[in-house]
Amino acid sequence: MAGNTFGTLYKLTSFGESHGRGVGGIIEGVAPGLELDADFIQQELDRRRPGQSAITTPRDESDRVEFISGVMDGKATGTPLAFVIWNKDQKSGDYDNLKDIYRPSHADYTYQSKYGIRDHRGGGRSSARETIARVVAGAVAKLMLNKLGVSVQAYVSQVGTIRLDKMHTDMDLSVAESNIVRCPDPEIAKMMIEKIDETRKAHDSIGGVVSCIIKNAPAGLGDPVFDKLHARLGQAMLSINAVKGFEYGSGFNAVEMLGSAHNDEFYTSDGKVRSRTNRSGGIQGGISNGEEIYFRVAFKPVATILKDQKTVDKEGNEIVMKARGRHDPCVVPRAVPIVEAMAAMVLTDALLINKSYL
Amino acid sequence: MAGNTFGTLYKLTSFGESHGRGVGGIIEGVAPGLELDADFIQQELDRRRPGQSAITTPRDESDRVEFISGVMDGKATGTPLAFVIWNKDQKSGDYDNLKDIYRPSHADYTYQSKYGIRDHRGGGRSSARETIARVVAGAVAKLMLNKLGVSVQAYVSQVGTIRLDKMHTDMDLSVAESNIVRCPDPEIAKMMIEKIDETRKAHDSIGGVVSCIIKNAPAGLGDPVFDKLHARLGQAMLSINAVKGFEYGSGFNAVEMLGSAHNDEFYTSDGKVRSRTNRSGGIQGGISNGEEIYFRVAFKPVATILKDQKTVDKEGNEIVMKARGRHDPCVVPRAVPIVEAMAAMVLTDALLINKSYL
Amino acid sequence: MAGNTFGTLYKLTSFGESHGRGVGGIIEGVAPGLELDADFIQQELDRRRPGQSAITTPRDESDRVEFISGVMDGKATGTPLAFVIWNKDQKSGDYDNLKDIYRPSHADYTYQSKYGIRDHRGGGRSSARETIARVVAGAVAKLMLNKLGVSVQAYVSQVGTIRLDKMHTDMDLSVAESNIVRCPDPEIAKMMIEKIDETRKAHDSIGGVVSCIIKNAPAGLGDPVFDKLHARLGQAMLSINAVKGFEYGSGFNAVEMLGSAHNDEFYTSDGKVRSRTNRSGGIQGGISNGEEIYFRVAFKPVATILKDQKTVDKEGNEIVMKARGRHDPCVVPRAVPIVEAMAAMVLTDALLINKSYL
Amino acid sequence: MAGNTFGTLYKLTSFGESHGRGVGGIIEGVAPGLELDADFIQQELDRRRPGQSAITTPRDESDRVEFISGVMDGKATGTPLAFVIWNKDQKSGDYDNLKDIYRPSHADYTYQSKYGIRDHRGGGRSSARETIARVVAGAVAKLMLNKLGVSVQAYVSQVGTIRLDKMHTDMDLSVAESNIVRCPDPEIAKMMIEKIDETRKAHDSIGGVVSCIIKNAPAGLGDPVFDKLHARLGQAMLSINAVKGFEYGSGFNAVEMLGSAHNDEFYTSDGKVRSRTNRSGGIQGGISNGEEIYFRVAFKPVATILKDQKTVDKEGNEIVMKARGRHDPCVVPRAVPIVEAMAAMVLTDALLINKSYL
């Protein structure tokens, strides 16, 4: 029963189910003396919050983090930072009908297979509500990165077939947070919002892509050979609910390229070794090279839809599952802070490992 | 300095540089009593070997594994299985000219940044020669999986723009090993080989995709929430040299789909819960569901090409690096056994973790 | 910032300070389906509780455990079992005078040195209140061990110079819980209680020894070479507050013995390989051999005493610290359940590791 | 199958059996650029070497370390340092008679129980020959500690009943290496040597104690709560073959003391917080306080003796095992460098962890 801890020195151990008492975690590796900016942490949670806009699930969960340990007078003491977010909107009764049903493309059947027992209420541990713990640990990591000038920003770059084709270097990314779909191009954002709205009305769900940019990361982060920086980023992103793919730098496009067209020539600027093309995505041989790190994360359409579906129950009877419940028609807008959180954790961990032998 | 160990219970700790004394590793978690089929292990190494065909690098490295511990009378004893493959073809002199040069899109600059010192000969630790250790540990993992009837097979599904579009379920995968590019479709294979040959003659390199299929994996493998089976597969694949992307099941294609079209309906067959469509790629909520597990791995064109390139040296001078050396025009044919090896390790590790509490 | 997790597969990650919001932890590796007997867990906490008898600290802390996750309908689900015990008796004001003082033989100075910041209230993280989390995780481990018939029992075998010299095999250990000092010999218990009472009246503290016996552990537990069963037990015990030494089997007495007198001859009984003398303490080469496992743990007199003491403050001024506060004159009676808890965790972890490859 | 790796950031993963091809390991966390002083490393191995004096086993093993990776031009590159010491003196035939016998107080029976298979030749993995890997990793750790002025020195303080009662602070420890028993008091050393010689002639073995002193360790090392510095030292020492007990600072003597007599008063000297009495053994709350760290390690008489002994074979038959083979009458003189090596590894690991967040 592994899998609940992420990181080597900056570590989150996460707990909690959708409809248990609460979700939370223990964060280790927080810099002693760090000011735990409560407003910032709450703001990050609010970016993830259900019910925040017309295109997210109408479940209204005003999640508030409660720190239990590791903090005194607003500062981290260097001891484990435990926190909990109590579950409030626990309509467990909603789920009684799902007790014996394996919902299509959900984790009901696999949890039952693995553990021989499962918490069926709202997906239990497999619920995306678990990502709250990640957002908290990511917010604390961001506070540590901020001190070094490292920034992590994600945005929505695709919803269904509506795709933002501009490179991140050609946009003002700060625009992303000014619209509810979190796309830095206002025109494309509008189309995405319409698409999501249309999907919602059709009682369906739709996939999307979140892109993420890390600026000012120093060269030298990442640990060959198995913990290459992009391999850890990949694991981090693929561990988020509904993610089906990950690519960094030139990604899958690199497949069709020739080496002569793909290689990043080095040049020197202000005494620093630089590359103009950065198809490497800021990482070479698994180690950051000082250029911007960028990657893309593919999300499937969420499995919960408001349509009747064929499936089976625990006894193996083939049944029709009635449409019911509340859900996000498209998760990517709310996935943006989660992607950032995981990236911030990976970066902070790599920074701490690097410091240990410098 | 983390990063040299992969796995929790089935573990490889890897060592070695391209032009040091040798490469190798320590494998833990081998089933006591397992017959270590030396021929099979060597055969796996031979599939990875440079110089094996007209489309791979002409470097001829007849890598032979030497076990140092953990084995008696051909059987694993349950203690650490240490092994080494001595480096023979060490033309270090070839690399003297690279001592002070940062090759474009290689790890020269990043290793120097991270460690303040680097082994410049043939890429040192960042050389793909390190993957030999993975193939050995993967071969041993396969021997353990074989006993359970679990098979892992990879093949080349794309070279440049030449793409095999058939689903794995519509092909005889055993055909893959009958051609030098390792593609299960003989027609496409021929085109791929021509493409690679043409690239080689142009002194260039080209990217590709390796697909991998895992059959007969039992339901229940994988550990929520951070060690989801596909997250571990993703880290494993992204840790292989030249990999830029990973997707499983419907992958990036899921982005453009509606939930109603993407969801896998369950049905019952022979008392087992099954899905016909398997867009989930055999994994739901990070746990295997008993269907075939499949994923795709994107490889960039390798950075070594036989063309002059602009770059900088250690002192920051902008220079032109002369074309020189031997390289693979396309790594994917030789990457096939490496992808299989990493997948076999992930599966075996997940199996052992699962056994610990069943 | 390592150190807050104990175990490989059966794991406790602990958090909390003496005068923060609470203490608690996350337990991983709990068998899915295990009945979490709340009464038993509470009873274990009560055995550790301050204020339980005339010879313990008069601080009255009615610690009650609250499970937040990992449990449904009283059964463990196999997901992380998070729990918290809220701090109630928080007289932080009591500690204002200690804010800038380094108490002799306490961890005030070392925490300040390590972290540059510390929670001075009641010792913060270094308080023995942290051991509550261990008792909870140990109680759950005991529930798992009970199913296999494995028992773990500790008792007080020495207080100051009053020493119980009988071997555990010559006593009825169940007697231990019938007196407040937890010694299985009623006569010796009486003397110990008097000794502690006298020490309390003298405003002083005194050391002691806790012995522990594990019965019915199967052969094969423990992992060579660094995780030998007794090495893990040793780390576990030495991590308990105030512990200064650990010995198992013949222990320090073995030093003066000849091999011919120390070796345990094997014989056969009911088809099992047995040893009569068991100077090995049930462990050979770091692996259990099926005999009783036994060890002794040395506790120093606790550092808090009701006497004035010379010390220094944060500015380096030499001062006299006034006697104040509430404390245990002798910790060993309350340490008994903590020793058992750590032993139960080590055993359970070793059992799970063993199962992974059987 | 855990247990072959020691350390978090400074890590040794060990392999090898007594009569396999060789023993060795992989060291991670070596400072990039560190000069690997080959003479010093060999000298440490020579201190451990069998056959080095009249009071050790007559087996002559001129163990020479061979580094395979992680080093270039005599300097560590920061990549894994793999090494092997080939087994030369492999008289496997000597052990044919032991194939089916469980030697008293050896690990034969427990390995067989655990793995269902064992390498019977010379104890296989349970042989003390495995400690060679520790000495190499400890020697490299010492090279790192030397740069910080931290020294680790062990010596023999007891053989049988012959006990050195002086405190380490009252002796010139450098004297220890000038006699074959490694005791800093020449008079006591002579008595110890005579005792061992007498034991050897009696075809028996005898126990002993190794004491160890760490000087100039900075304050702040060690990680609460489970990885307290002394808990890690304890695990490290208890993992050495034949060790039965560990105590640090006042150790088991603390049991009989009152708090008022045991507490270390602080004073200030040269602006540093100091303690004169140091009964804490340089560690408070699991963290070093800048004073000397000292501890004692109890070794049993080794199980191999040249006397006939009763035991059982694999089939459970009770038999008499004939005296045979070569062994150390007392292991403590050769254990001195092993104790130092483990201590150096623990210290180096704690230093690296500490650096990660300073």
Image (tube, coloured by chain):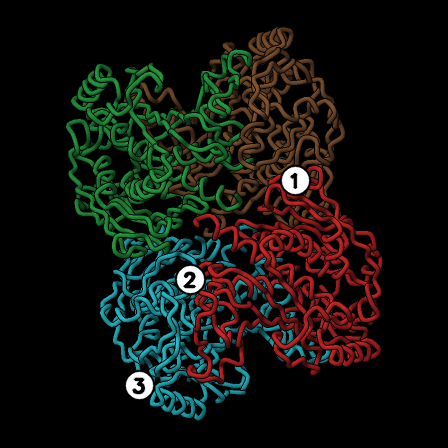
Chain colours: A red, B cyan, C brown, D green
Task: For mark 2, name the chain.
Answer: B
Name the residue tied to disc 2.
Answer: B144
Q: Amino acid at mark 2?
A: Met
Task: Please say if A251 is above or below C167.
Answer: below
Left or right side of C71 for D224: left
Task: For mark 3, name the chain.
Answer: B
- Name the residue at 58% across, 10% down: C192
Q: Do pointers 2 and 3 mark residues of a single chain?
A: yes
- Name the residue at 62% across, 62% down: A152
Q: Amino acid at mark 1?
A: Gly
Judged by depth in the image, the label closer to the viewer, 1 or 3, is 1
Task: Please say if C267 is above or below A28.
Answer: above
Instruction: Characterize the local packing of mark 3: few (<14), some (14-19) or many (20 or more) Cα atoms within 10 angstroms.
Output: few
Left or right side of A230 for D71: left
Q: What whole-number distance in Å separates the C-alpha atoms at marks 2 and 3? A: 33 Å
Judged by depth in the image, the label closer to the viewer, 2 or 3, is 3
Instruction: Characterize the local packing of mark 2: few (<14), some (14-19) or many (20 or more) Cα atoms within 10 angstroms.
Output: many
Q: Position of residue D193 (x, y in %)?
A: 20, 20
Name the residue tied to disc 3.
Answer: B54
